[in-house]
């Protein structure tokens, strides 16, 4: 069984965001790039499934749609333990375009399971995974918090408002994963970093694919007004302010 | 021409977020000078469908096919896309909840319609069609232009509110084609949390962090939540340590919530935590450290020990009720 993990290359979560060219573009000068947090967890779970001798997972491939700037992020995924990496050399213009590229790759290179994260922490598109499922006409499971394999018995858990569901499905399918899928993301070991240098990072030409949306402008949120401080003895005053000033009760 | 809103039901009932969706889509239809069609899939009584009229839904299309009683994103997307073709819809609108996240991207691919998730308000402009959404996990807003003829948007919870606009509802039945091959996923178990307020729906949330020091100390948090009819939440280290369940974790890598009131007790206010709560209407912070970053995003703050302040608050809220 083969697992494909989609990797989005995003600015470190502590990045202070700035824009350039009349607030029309993200200013990436000095930005540290990381594997999107959910993709890192998805990769971790994929590796755990491969290590578990009880099932037949034998290949973990990571895929990214983007420029050469993301190669360091893909090398990191290899150092963590992925067997191979594929980069589709295209500007990740919008979710439709990215998902379409990955679907074209999948048509030529079938996988049993495709993992994507619930959203990229930069543009928060939350669409690519489900779009891949639709392009491929695969079943898709969203908000996945656990994946367990026992040969052909595939069970997934997903969060539903105020509870959880356990589902059974058959391959191939797309799982859009969130928190819970793995406990802690793995970090690359020294040995992993050495081995990653020898692992394949294949660069593929982009397919013909439309772009349907574009970011035209960014703005920073309005400054928040000062926080009103209340004495710890004055709980009643806070209740009064919440009722009559903030009007939230 | 038309604009379609997909109104999901929960065991045959709509929620406030459904009515917010209808209010939003009605305004959008008015702006575009076109008709609103609200689509309901699954078993929903006519009485319940009629409640949509309060928010301007004059035409409701109901698909009542037992195969569709369980939400399957693949099949639902097919139904929505079929209706969109039939009604020459220019925009399809859904709520940005679990099901919207699963279905909307599929509808986008089927219709070759550009999609934007979790928009914050009515479009900034209609021609070109530009919508505004949070990006970089709340650190900025982005204006996104959709260039395709058809468009799909999902709207963020609590971004618009309810607008009453009572009309007579016309219910039409629609029988789309759905074949068995669309249902490859089987639900084998379902657990619902019945007794507690559901975090993603809650108007008031009481949340606590590592400042509580130990999982045994949670009683004051739960008592305050109970008095307020609030849901409980926590910071990431608290759920990572197993002090509280994962379903309570809010922030960039947990849930993104937008309650009216968020009370943060013993939470430092790290940027990744704030990413999940910055859409709250009002934030109250309780922290021993007057320099804690949470105070720079809070509306009201108390410098003090959670173990002393929380019981006082509980008492004050209780007294204000009676
Ligand atoms: C990629 C990434 C993603 C992340 N995602 C998230 C996320 O989604 N959600 C999230 O929450 N975090 C997230 N984090 C972690 C985040 O950076 C912080 O570490 C975390 O939010 C801190 O949790 P905390 O405020 O409970 O604990 P701390 O930072 O330890 O803060 C405890 C606070 O309690 C106060 N305190 C101590 N004792 C008392 C007392 N007796 N009374 C009152 N106050 C007291 C202290 O002054 C302090 O401010 C993420 C981190 C990374 C790197
Ligand atoms: N450029 C990309 N290349 C590969 N996968 C991506 C890319 N962008 C997004 N993804 C995947 O899609 C998920 C959701 O991203 P998004 O729809 O952009 O919010 C991410 O967690 C990744 O798994």
Image (spheres, rainbow, N blue to C red):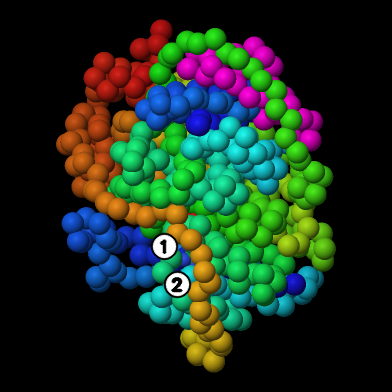
Question: Where residue B61 sits in the image (x, y, percent)?
Answer: 63, 24
- CA neighbours of label 2 inside 10 A, class few (<14), some (14 to 19), many (20+): some
Which is more toward the observer, A199 or B91? B91
Magenta residues span B41-69
Query: Would you say residue A65 is visible in this rendering?
Result: yes
Q: Quadrant of the C terminus of chain A?
A: top left
Question: Where residue A171 sits in the image (x, y, percent)?
Answer: 76, 62
Judge left or right: residue B56 versus residue A148.
left
- For image coordinates 22% across by 55% down, the residue present is A23
- For image coordinates 35% across by 12% down, the residue present is B320
* Residue A81 location, quadrant: bottom right
Report the disc number at residue A90. Answer: 2
Reply yes or no: does residue B142 show up in magenta.
no
In the displayed structure, would residue B209 be above or below residue A40?
above
Reply yes or no: does residue B67 show up in magenta.
yes
Which is more toward the observer, A50 or A204? A204
Question: Where residue A101 sits in the image (x, y, percent)?
Answer: 54, 67
In the displayed structure, would residue A101 be above or below residue B47?
below
Element type where label 2 sits in the image: loop
């Amino acid at each position: 069984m083969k697992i494909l993990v989609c990797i989005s290359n995003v600015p470190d979560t502590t990045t202070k965001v700035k824009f350039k060219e009349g607030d029309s573009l993200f200013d990436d000068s000095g930005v540290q790039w990381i594997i999107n947090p959910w993709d890192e967890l998805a990769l971790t779970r994929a590796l755990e499934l491969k290590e578990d001798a009880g099932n037949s997972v034998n290949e973990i491939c990571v895929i990214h749609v983007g420029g050469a700037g993301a190669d360091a992020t893909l090398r990191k995924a290899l150092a963590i333990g992925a067997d191979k990496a594929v980069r589709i050399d295209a500007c990740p213009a919008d979710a439709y375009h990215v998902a379409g590229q990955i679907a074209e790759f999948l048509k030529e290179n079938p996988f049993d399971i495709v993992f994507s994260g619930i959203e990229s922490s930069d543009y928060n598109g939350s669409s690519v995974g489900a779009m891949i499922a639709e392009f491929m006409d695969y079943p898709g499971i969203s908000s996945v918090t656990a994946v367990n394999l026992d040969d052909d018995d595939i069970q997934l858990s997903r969060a539903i408002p105020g509870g959880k569901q356990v589902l059974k499905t058959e391959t191939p399918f797309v799982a859009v994963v969130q928190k819970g899928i793995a406990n802690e993301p793995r970090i690359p070991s020294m040995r992993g970093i050495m081995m990653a240098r020898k692992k394949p990072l294949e660069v593929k030409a982009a397919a013909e694919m439309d772009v349907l949306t574009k970011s035209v402008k960014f703005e920073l949120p309005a400054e928040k007004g000062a926080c009103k401080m209340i004495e710890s003895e004055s709980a009643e005053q806070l209740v009064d302010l919440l009722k009559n000033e903030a009007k939230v009760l | 021409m038309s604009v379609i809103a997909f109104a999901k039901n929960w065991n045959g009932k709509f929620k406030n977020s459904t009515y917010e969706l209808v209010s939003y889509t009605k305004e959008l239809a008015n702006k575009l000078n076109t008709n609103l069609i609200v689509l309901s899939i699954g078993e929903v009584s006519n009485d319940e469908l009629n409640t949509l009229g309060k928010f301007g839904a004059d035409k409701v299309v109901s698909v009542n096919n037992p195969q569709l009683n369980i939400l399957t994103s693949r099949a639902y997307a097919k139904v929505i896309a079929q209706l969109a073709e039939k009604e020459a819809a220019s925009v399809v609108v859904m709520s940005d909840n679990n099901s919207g996240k699963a279905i909307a991207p599929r509808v986008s691919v089927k219709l070759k319609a550009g999609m934007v998730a979790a928009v914050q308000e009515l479009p900034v402009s209609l021609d070109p069609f530009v919508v505004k959404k949070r990006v970089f996990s709340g650190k900025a807003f982005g204006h996104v232009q959709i260039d395709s003829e058809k468009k799909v948007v999902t709207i963020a919870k609590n971004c618009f509110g309810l607008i009453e606009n009572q009309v007579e509802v016309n219910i039409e039945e629609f029988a789309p084609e759905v074949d068995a091959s669309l249902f490859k996923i089987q639900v084998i178990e379902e657990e619902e949390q019945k007794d507690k307020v559901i975090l993603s729906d809650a108007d008031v949330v009481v949340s606590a962090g590592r400042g509580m020091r130990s999982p045994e100390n949670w009683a004051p948090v739960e008592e305050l939540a109970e008095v307020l009819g609030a849901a409980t939440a926590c910071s990431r280290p608290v759920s990572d340590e197993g002090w509280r369940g994962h379903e309570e974790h809010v922030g960039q890598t947990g849930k993104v919530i937008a309650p009216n009131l968020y009370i943060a007790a013993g939470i430092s206010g790290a940027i990744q935590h704030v990413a999940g709560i910055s859409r709250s209407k009002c934030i109250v912070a309780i922290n021993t450290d007057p320099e804690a970053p949470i105070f720079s995003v809070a509306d009201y703050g108390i410098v003090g020990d959670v173990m002393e302040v929380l019981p006082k608050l509980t008492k004050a809220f209780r007294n204000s009720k009676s």
